Image (spheres, rainbow, N blue to C red):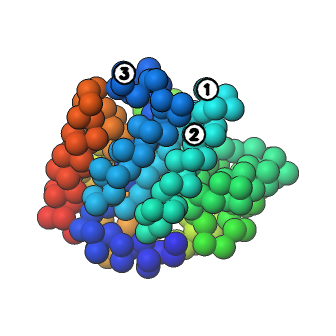
Amino acid sequence: MTYLQLSDEIRRKGSFLCVGLDTDIKLIPEHLQKCEYPLFEFNKAIIEATAPYAVAFKPNTAFYEALGVRGWKQLEMTVSYIKEHYPEALVIADAKRGDIGNTADMYARCFFENMDCDAVTLAPYMGEDSVRPFLDYEGKWSVILALTSNRSAEDFETLALAGEKSEQLFEKVLRTASTWGSKENTMFVVGATRPEKLTEIRAICPDHFLLVPGVGAQGGSVEEVARYGLNDYCGLLVNSSRSIIYASGGEDFAQRAAEEAAKLASKMALLL
């Protein structure tokens, strides 16, 4: 999916919602626990219910990897289901990979060739060669961690760097990583819990798409994110996971997920 295709899909749906599939086997409804593939059955229902409002889905690979081979199989089934039934949706593997070149090449093959994801989240700490293999895939996206929504982000990400130019570490990441690719294949992760920082971030990368987690259960506001982060092409994918997929723990879980997704999407439509 190209930059303009993603922007056009956002305009068409009137939404820049990304639904996070952080599917915890301990939290899915009891009636699904007896299924052969409970994570997939849960995801399938969530995807069908929220697809009218979402332009992207983001399975967090940890929730599947924790279950071993059966979990990984259900991750593959989930991605395949989205690609077959909702090909207009961007599929982001939230894997947070980041390793030296030859290892990064294997990770890129895993997510882009074998699983056919559209994007993957990456930790840039080891530098360009840990990201380059992902950027070499035409039509795929590298989603690079910059300023995350967790409380401990300030341990490193907002540290001031020594030198003539007053710069925080996350700003250095944005400036440097922006030169590795382009707005067509690179996004940055910026947490919704620090919306005021989006002004600084937009000064560095005005045109890139930003993946913004932290709306919903973590307390971020979609209105605040839009105020500081929107650009002429929207340029935002706001992710919500727990507040949507776990809106109900009962048999009405999919219906409730749809209702929560619709609420967020309706706010987004007013902001575009």
Q: Earlier in the sequence, mark 1 or mark 3?
A: 3
Give me the disc on residue 173: none
Amino acid type assigned to the residue bearing label 2 in the image: Gln
User: What's the distance in space between the residues labelled 1 and 3, CA to CA?
Assistant: 17 Å
Q: Judge by depth and name the residue closer to the eye, 30 or 23.
A: 30
User: In the rendering, at what x and y percent does residue 256 appear?
Assistant: 21, 39
Residue 163 visible at all: no
> Disc 3 on helix, strand or loop?
helix
Q: Residue at x 16, y 58 (%)?
A: 266
In this rendering, the answer to whether 158 lies above or below 233 is above
Q: Is residue 105 visible?
A: yes
Give SS at disc 1.
loop
Q: Residues within 10 Å of mark 1 (few under 14, many from 20)?
A: some
Task: Work out how far the residue at label 3 is from the one at label 2, CA to CA, in angstroms.
Answer: 18 Å
Give above or below for 3 relative to 190.
Answer: below
Sequence-first disc among 1 and 2: 1
Which residue is labeled 3 in the image?
30
Residue under the point 53% across and 34% down: 37
Return the disc, 3 or 2, that comes first in the chain's sequence: 3
Q: CA distance from mark 1 to mark 2?
A: 10 Å
Q: Which residue is situated farthest in the front direction here?
A: 35
Res. 74 mark: 2
Badge nearest the viewer, 1 or 2: 2
Estimate the x, y position of residue 31 in percent, counting from the top left: 36, 25
Circles 1 and 2 in contact, beta carbons < 8 Å: yes
Q: Residues within 10 Å of mark 3 (few under 14, many from 20)?
A: some
> Quarter holding the C terminus?
bottom left
Q: Which residue is mark 1?
A: 67
